[in-house]
Image (spheres, helix red, strand yellow):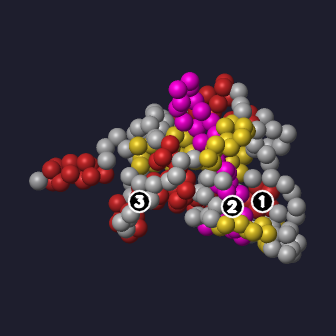
Amino acid sequence: MAITRLQSPIPRVRPLKVQDLRWPTTPLRVLAAPMHPGGVDVFHVLNGRRTDRHFRRLSERSLSTFLWYSARTRFAYVDASGRRFESKPAPSAGGCHPHDLLIIRPGRGGLEASVYDSRAHALAKLRCQTAALRRFVRHVADAVRPEQGTIVWLLAQPQRTENHYHFPESLLWRDAGALIGIMAVVADSLNLAFCPVGATGDPHITRLFRTRQDAYGFGGAILGGRVASRSTIARSMRLQAS
């Protein structure tokens, strides 16, 4: 196997000032207040975490709670040099957080696609061609069938990291892995089905957005209600053992 060698990132003395890519979306719709799950032991979650490949429809309240604890912006600021920092649950090189989230879920009239605004904790409906959206979903389904689940996909804004680092490529991939890992732990803590997907999403992401600049997919996951709850599975395992 040929492995592409990526150069080591080097912090810039002065940040660049490349602006974010604006996704073609409608006005924001604030999500319902998240639930506040109590009594969750992180070590118990890590010990029992597993991947699910069957998904029930996800309620908006569950989606809100998942996004709140895995991807929302807790605070953000710009320092005197113009360097931008954000604080989110997942770690990110330099606090750049280069990945936005594309949310695709089944709706009454077909598929609904939105972009998550992590600062407002809101969804903005994506304006895109239905055919392009369906092609992207088929691309994901080639790896894992979404069934009634919700697709959560990483949309890279490489300039956020490039503004502060020379050779940022490896940081983008490491940030993507850290974010998906945090999402997996949060999903399991909420007793939700979660399965990372190996596909990147390209070139379908670029075709989906049809922007003047390239849009990049950095992988994602499928999220949904569990077909069998953890308590049901545990009880079934005990019966089999006896």
Considering the numbered disc 2 on the image, is that residue within a helix, a strand or a loop? loop
Q: Residue 63 vs residue 38: left or right?
A: right
Q: Earlier in the sequence, mark 3 or mark 1?
A: 3
Rendered image quadrant of residue 81:
bottom right
Return the mark for residue 208: none
Regarding residue 140, the answer to whether it shows in the image is no
**Residue 45 in the image: above or below residue 210:** below
Query: Image point 11% across, 53% down: which residue?
Result: 242
Crowd band around label 1 with a 10 angstrom C-alpha radius: few (<14), some (14–19), many (20+): many
Which residue type does callout 2 highlight?
His
Q: Nearer the viewer, residue 239 or 225?
A: 225
Mark 1 in CB contact with mark 2 (< 8 angstroms): yes
Q: Mark 3 or mark 2, which is nearer the start of the sequence?
A: 3
Q: Label 3 amino acid?
A: Pro
Tell me if residue 110 is in the magenta stretch.
yes
- Mark-to-mark CA distance, 1 and 2: 7 Å
Q: On the image, numbered disc 3 is attached to which residue?
A: 37
Which structural element holds mark 1?
helix
149 and 161: which one is in front?
149
Question: Contact (CB < 8 A) between labels 3 and 1?
Answer: no
Earlier in the chain: of badge 1 and badge 2, it is: 2
Q: Residue at x 37, y 44 (%)?
A: 226
CA–CA distance in space, label 2 to label 3 = 26 Å
Classify mark 3: residues with Cα within 10 Å, few (<14), some (14-19) or many (20+).
few
Q: On residue 97, which mark appears?
A: 2
* Magenta stretch in the rendered image: 91-119
| Residue located beneath label 1 in the image | 160
Q: Amino acid at mark 1?
A: Arg
Residue 117 x/y as whole percent: 67, 50
Residue sitting at x 46%, y 34%: 148
Image coordinates for residue 68, horizontal then vertical, percent = 55, 56
